[in-house]
Image (cartoon, rainbow, N blue to C red):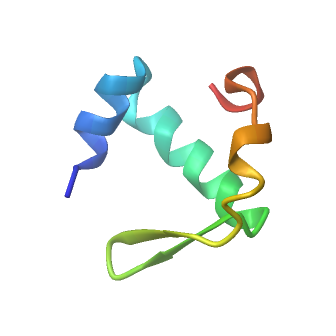
Amino acid sequence: MEKRDSIAAMLGISTRQLNRDLKDLAELNIIQFKNKTVKVLDSDYLPEIKATDFF
């Protein structure tokens, strides 16, 4: 299990930006947060996302 700080570092973004992007993905019903875990609801959509759309 990775923490948000380490995920953000791997992506080269701030933890704050990661949190915003995860929130945006959740609002689009692509992911879901539950008990400090992230569940991918629409894995078909993920490859279509461009990095510039979020980061």
* In this rendering, position of residue 11 left or right of residue 27: left
42 up-or-down from 54: above or below:
below
Residue at image coords 68%, 55%: 25
Residue at image coords 79%, 62%: 28
Q: On the rendered image, what quadrant is the N terminus found in?
A: bottom left
Nearer-the-camera pick, 7 or 16: 7
Count of picture labels: 0
Nearer-the-camera pick, 40 or 28: 40
Nearer-the-camera pick, 38 or 43: 43
Residue at image coords 58%, 45%: 20
17 up-or-down from 33: above or below:
above
Q: Quadrant of residue 42?
A: bottom right
* In this rendering, position of residue 10 left or right of residue 27: left
Q: On the rendered image, what quadrant is the C terminus found in?
A: top right
Find residue 54 and report its horizontal and vertical position in percent: 69, 32
* In this rendering, position of residue 22 left or right of residue 47: left
* In this rendering, position of residue 21 left or right of residue 37: right
Find residue 9 and report its horizontal and vertical position in percent: 30, 24
Farthest bottom residue in view: 35
